[in-house]
Each structure stands twice: as C-alpha cells, then as structure tokens.
Image (cartoon, rainbow, N blue to C red):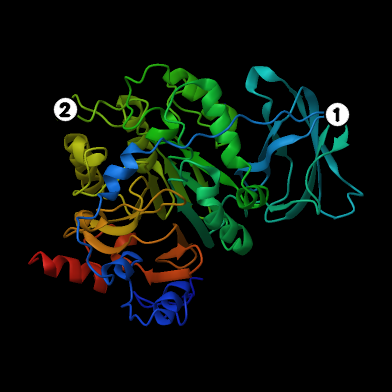
C-alpha cells in the first residue's frame, strides 16, 4: 500500500568477551559463587540444597497461567494528538515515508527542513486521518537531497504534535553509492510491550545502525481480528525506545505467525485479509512494482550496493503438516519467481534474503525444514546460476545463532527482543551452527562495506544490558558464493562434543 577499495578494519571481539563485572557476575560474586562464561541464572538455582519432594515443572506451571492481554487504548480527550509514531518507513536518496497513528479525525502535514529553525521548510500534506484506517496514515516526503540530515515536525489540524526537540533523519546516499551500511535486525517482541522495553531502549540510546528490520512476531495478537491487530501494533509502537528510534531510523518489516494470525498460521488462516489490512495500515515499507495482483507482503530495495529481498513466508504457505513434495510451498509460485528474477538481475554485490522462518537444515517444524523440496530447489538454483553474495536472515526462534547452510550461505537468526528465551536452544545446534547465544534479549547487526572490490561483511550480536557480546568478519568466500567453513564458537564446540560430534 505504501506503497574503501581500501580495506576497512573492524574491531573484533572474542566469542565470549570478558565482561568484567556484569550484573550476572556481580550476583555470583556477592553470593560466593563462580560462574563460567555463558552460564545462565539457572546455574544459581542448581547450587541450592535439594528439596525433599520433586520440584514442579516450570513449563507445566507456565501452561496453566493465563496468557497476558494488552488492555484497550485509553481515549485521549481534547485536541487531536499522536497515539503512535511518527515512524520512518522506506527511505531512499531523495524521498522518505513517514507514518503516524492519531487519536481522532484530523488533517495532517509534515514540515521538513535542513535547519533547526525551519526557516525554509518544505511542506508535505498527509491528508485526512479517520477511523476507516484506525487513524493511521503515511506520507511520502519527496524532492529530498541525498545523504542529508533533515529536521521535521508533524502537525495535526495545523498544530505541532511531534516531540521536542524535533526528530532528525538522514536520507540515503546516491542510488549508485557503494560504501558502509549497518543493518540491525531482530524478532519476537514479547506478549506485552514492557517485554522488549530494555532492548528497544538500548537500541534507541545507541542508534549505531542505519536501518532496522523487524523480522516477524512484531506483536503477539495471535489473531486475524482487525481491532485486536490494531491494538497490539499500537501498544508496541508506544514503547519509549521504539518511538525514539523509529522517529530517526528507517524501519522495515515482514511478518511471522503471531502477528499474522494464530501460532503456526499458514495460507489457510481464516480472516487473513484482515491481518493484511492491519499490516498495510501500520507499516510504510518499500513499494513493490511487480506482481501487484499478489497480496502477499514481499518487497525489495537497494541501498549502498546491497539489495534486500524481504519475504512473506505466511500468505502462500502450505500447512507445515502437509506431505512434502513439489506442490508444498512456503513462498508461492509468484513470489518464488519474483525472487529468482530479482536475484538473477541484481547488480548488488551483497544480496540479503530475509525470512520470518529459519532456513537452516535442522530447524523445527515451523521453519523451512518442513518445506525441504522447495528449499532444496531454491538452493540448487542459487548454485547453478552462480548467484554471489547471498546472506540469509531469519527470526522466530527466541535465540540468536549463526549457521553455514550447505557450507555455502551464512544465516543469522536474531532475537528475542522481548519473548522468553528458548529452553531447548541447545537442541537446535547442529553441524551447520557456528555460533549460538540463548540468554538475554538480543538483536544483531550486519556491518557491510561494498566499497572494496571484494565487499566485507561482519556480524555483531548485541544483548540488552551487556552491549556487543560477539563480532566476527565473514570469510571472503561468502561474498564470492563459494563453499566455506566458519570456526565454531567455544559454546557450539562444547555442545557438539557432548553429543560426540
């Protein structure tokens, strides 16, 4: 709807950084305990004296607890105000999309200026906001200069309602620009807005990236009911950290099951058209020119020599339990053809494929593992066509990890931003895994430099309250589309050794 050649040195950290006196180690020290690096808080509990009777099963207890619900929004009396936003969407070298949700009917506009006094501001009319789209709207700010800093103000009924000091954003460099780009990405915000407040707060405080990708489970409405979708989107947008970073950095999104419909939803989800309506109301992603008759939410865009293919793995998805074969699909025919055509004609040195579901071979049932025929055919095609520079992104798993899929394509699974951490993360470690982190609220950053003849790509894992906990440069073979092996982290080595692998 909304619609160099010089080598740059990047500071590297060891797999398990010396964190000095972190909160976890402080607790351990003050308790007279010694925690090895990577230990979780459960290790503290293991030191307690054994009780006479068996401990209750925490999973069973959690299953009996009612699922937390988000309360309805409070009405805002008086003059029109902003419920959520402003939030930047797609930003190019000469335009930017800006999104808001207002509290009531109003007309809105945006003033954009290179100077903080707004002496020579450009005015962009956003039109009317009304209840038909839950008072959401996005406006295209056009005629902007490349790589330029802009101040902006949002006005409802000619009254400034955006925060002070005025938010600032940067346009992208020229379309042909080759250079450095930092992309933050994660997933799984948690059932309540407070769950991800620490992660978003730290991200907003640092703002050490150029783009933010939300890779699904961007709320946990678990429904296709339109009003519930709107409520959950809005509540999560109201988190202070997200409000701040969204007002200053471009945010792009795809969905996964919990923000599309019930858990493990697929193309058969009843009422999915309402989920689609809510998605289009609340995100201002890059437009898609091809396959306009296809309602799925996939799209692509290019920035700094990197092309991003943001995929929809729900709208056309066959049920996970369906027998695997040529008729079982994750992407659907039109999206798959669009992806292949885009990859084949892309001139970008690095190509990012973002999916809500994991690509790795050893995934769970709600991942590409259940769609092996389509997955294998796509990977075979990438090899046959000699497509270079492919990096895979995903979310969903409530831990962060890196895999070398088929010893050829790196995959990075990032999260959770707020959801409980996966208890069985160790079970997901396989021969393809080269790193895993399963304790804390996390996001990842890809640091990409396309200015050298051979681009350089590194990844970083960040944890709320701890900062950057891991950073490594990917082998040069990755950007050349050649087979490679990543050295495994000590934790992965230990887990595999325990299994005799």
Seen in the picture, residue 276 relative to 369 is either above or below; the reply is above
Residue located 58% across and 32% down the image: 71
Residue 353 lies, with reference to residue 155, above or below; the image says below
As drawn, the residue found furthest toward the left would be 500
State whether residue 283 appears in this view.
Answer: no
- The C terminus lies in quadrant: bottom left
Discs 2/1, front: 1
Q: CA distance from mark 2 to mark 1?
A: 55 Å
Q: Do the residues under discs 2 and 1 have CB atoms within 8 angstroms?
A: no
In the picture, the disc for residue 157 is 1
First along the sequence among labels 2 and 1: 1
Horizontal arrangement in the rendering, residue 445 relative to residue 495 (left or right): right
Q: Is residue 310 above or below residue 37?
A: above
Residue at position x 38%, y 17% from top?
270
Q: Nearer the viewer, residue 392 or 413?
A: 413
The front one of 244 and 393 is: 244
Side of 224 relative to 40 (left or right) = right
Locate residue 491 relative to residue 181 in the image: left or right: left
Q: Quadrant of the N terminus?
A: top right
Q: Position of residue 53 (x, y in %)?
A: 20, 56
Residue 115 x, y percent position in the rendering: 85, 55
Provide residue 324's location: percent of width, then percent of height.
14, 30
Q: Classify residue 404 by image quadrant.
A: bottom left
Q: Which mark is residue 326?
A: 2
Question: Which label belongs to residue 8?
Answer: none
**Residue at coordinates 20% horizontally, 27% vertically from top-left?**
328
Place residue 428 in its image quadrant. Answer: bottom left
């Amino acid at each position: 709807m909304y619609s160099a050649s010089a080598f740059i040195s990047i500071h590297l950290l060891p797999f398990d950084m010396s964190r000095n006196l972190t909160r976890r180690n402080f607790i351990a020290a003050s308790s007279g305990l010694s925690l090895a690096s990577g230990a979780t808080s459960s290790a503290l509990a293991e030191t307690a004296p054994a009780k006479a009777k068996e401990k209750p099963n925490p999973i069973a207890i959690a299953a009996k607890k009612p699922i937390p619900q988000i309360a309805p929004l409070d009405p805002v009396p008086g003059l029109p105000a902003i419920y959520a936003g402003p939030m930047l969407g797609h930003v190019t070298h000469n335009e930017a999309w800006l999104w808001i949700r207002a509290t009531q009917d109003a007309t809105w506009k945006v003033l954009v200026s290179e100077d903080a006094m707004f002496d020579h501001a450009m005015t962009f009319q956003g039109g009317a906001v009304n209840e038909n789209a839950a008072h959401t709207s996005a406006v295209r700010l056009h005629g902007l200069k490349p790589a330029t800093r802009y101040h902006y103000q949002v006005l409802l009924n000619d009254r400034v309602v955006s925060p002070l000091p005025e938010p600032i954003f940067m346009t992208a460099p020229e379309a042909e620009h080759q250079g450095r780009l930092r992309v933050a990405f994660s997933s799984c915000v948690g059932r309540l807005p407070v769950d991800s407040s620490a992660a978003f707060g730290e991200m907003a405080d640092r703002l050490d990236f150029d783009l933010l990708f939300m890779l699904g489970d961007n709320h946990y409405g678990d429904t296709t009911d339109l009003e519930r979708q709107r409520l959950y989107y809005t509540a999560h947008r109201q988190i202070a950290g997200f409000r701040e970073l969204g007002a200053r950095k471009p945010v792009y999104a795809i969905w996964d099951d919990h923000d599309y419909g019930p858990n493990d939803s697929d193309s058969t989800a009843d009422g999915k058209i309402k989920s689609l309506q809510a998605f289009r109301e609340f995100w201002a992603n890059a437009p898609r020119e091809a396959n306009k008759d296809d309602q799925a939410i996939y799209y692509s865009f290019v920035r700094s020599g990197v092309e991003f293919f943001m995929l929809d793995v729900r709208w056309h998805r066959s049920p996970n339990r369906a027998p695997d074969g040529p008729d079982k699909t994750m992407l659907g025919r039109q999206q798959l053809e669009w992806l292949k055509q885009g990859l084949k004609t892309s001139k970008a040195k690095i190509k990012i494929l973002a999916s809500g579901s994991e690509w790795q071979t050893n995934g769970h049932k709600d991942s590409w593992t259940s769609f092996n025929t389509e997955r294998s055919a796509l990977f075979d095609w990438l090899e046959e066509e000699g497509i270079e520079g492919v990096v895979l992104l995903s979310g969903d798993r409530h831990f962060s990890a890196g895999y070398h899929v088929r010893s050829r394509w790196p995959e990075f699974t990032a999260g959770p931003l707020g959801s409980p951490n996966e208890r069985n993360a160790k079970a997901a470690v396989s021969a393809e895994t080269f790193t895993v982190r399963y304790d804390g609220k996390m996001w990842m950053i890809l640091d990409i430099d396309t200015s050298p003849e051979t681009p350089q790509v590194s990844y970083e894992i960040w944890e709320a309250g701890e900062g950057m906990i891991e950073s490594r440069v990917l082998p040069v073979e990755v950007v050349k589309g050649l087979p490679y092996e990543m050295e495994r982290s000590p934790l992965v080595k230990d887990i595999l050794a325990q299994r005799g692998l």
